[in-house]
Amino acid sequence: MLRLYDYLESGNGYKVRLLLHQLERPYERVELDILAGQTRTPEFLALNPNGRIPLLQLEDGTCLAESGAIQWYLAEGTPFLPQDRLFRAQVLQWMFFEQYSHEPYIAVLRFWHHAGVLEDHRHELDARRARGEEALRVMETHLETNAFFAAGRYTIADIALYAYTHVAHEGGFDLSGLPAVRAWLERVRAQPGHVPSERG
Amino acid sequence: MLRLYDYLESGNGYKVRLLLHQLERPYERVELDILAGQTRTPEFLALNPNGRIPLLQLEDGTCLAESGAIQWYLAEGTPFLPQDRLFRAQVLQWMFFEQYSHEPYIAVLRFWHHAGVLEDHRHELDARRARGEEALRVMETHLETNAFFAAGRYTIADIALYAYTHVAHEGGFDLSGLPAVRAWLERVRAQPGHVPSERG
């Protein structure tokens, strides 16, 4: 059976959990407490030298890291990843956008809120908030004329962007002025097999 | 003809240029000066709402953003991107690693050096340097037992990681204690059709 090394509060972990649920793929979940250093033990570093979850372990023991790569691997050959070459590149474009221009601002501010360490990062907060707001505006612009991010339908690009956008308010981001983003969040929630992030 | 919106000093642009040279694909290059705001004009934002280079414009006018997505699109069906499902996911794993755990530290410190704004970011420098060194150690660990990053051969994962690793010293990173990384840099330079980053 597939084994997912995971942390329930992680949006990056949720991306994989949500996809596995929607694919109806059974898996074993191993919860690791990031804050307690459980992803930095010698045992875990032997599986993923980068010391991060999510990590997917295949039936033969092979480990795959990075939420985007795991999603791509699992979605191949399913409706969650289109076949067309340009559509596939557009799915990846939004997944790289999420990891580079969205997650480091929207997810990280939420994490600092939760961990109670905002004050330690006071010199970066304004810049991080501005970059996060910019990412949300880029999403709004796209969604004003598109129902989903790529291929005209729900794909792993939507899963990747949903994970931290739907909890952006926990990092202090205000979605009230972004009606297209809010309507898209509802469309994602309405997909068959959708599960909330709290469910392991 | 393909058109690449680019900035010659950008390693993200170089990834695409290097691949295009190795694929022997002709293209037109449009240089935009990031520092002069040329990627934030209304004209460019109409092509890429995220206001970043590299941006690839296809023959039919379609635009594709994000260096990783552009590389994937161009490499599909060529020796630079394997066919095997797991190998492809491993290529992506290292490309996401580069954009999330490597570029924001190694490329950004170099950019701050070049732009003369290190002092503006003095509160972040130690943390960014430590993360960059950690990324280089992860690479060293992998390369101690692997000649390339995925599929046992030179792929776009190597191109993605080469772009900023080979100029890491310009951001103050020291590769002298990383013999496997230095040997891999030489292997990448020895690939047919390799061109240095300064060449547009």
Image: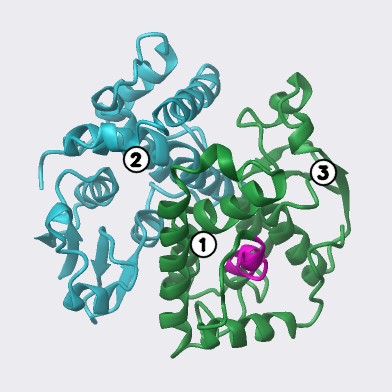
Chain colours: A cyan, B green
Relative horizontal placement of residue A123, taking residue A198 as reference (left or right): right
SS for tag 3? loop
Pinpoint residue B48: horizontal percent, then vertical percent: 67, 32
The residue shown at (52%, 16%) is A144
Pinpoint residue A147: horizontal percent, then vertical percent: 46, 24
Q: As shown in the figure, which amino acid type bears the numbered disc 2?
A: Ile
| Mark 1 neighbour class, 10 Å CA radius: few under 14, some 14 to 19, many 20 or more | many
Pinpoint residue A42: horizontal percent, then vertical percent: 20, 78
Relative horizontal placement of residue A15, taking residue B141 as reference (left or right): left
Query: Which residue position is annotated with label 3?
Result: B59
Q: As shown in the figure, which amino acid type bears the numbered disc 1?
A: Met
**Tag shown at residue A186:** none
Of label 3 and label 1, which has the lower sequence position?
Answer: 3
The subunit carrying tag 3 is B
Query: Image height check: is A103 above or below A76?
Result: above
Q: Reply yes or no: does residue A151 show up in magenta.
A: no
Decide: marks 2, 3 in contact (CB < 8 A)? no
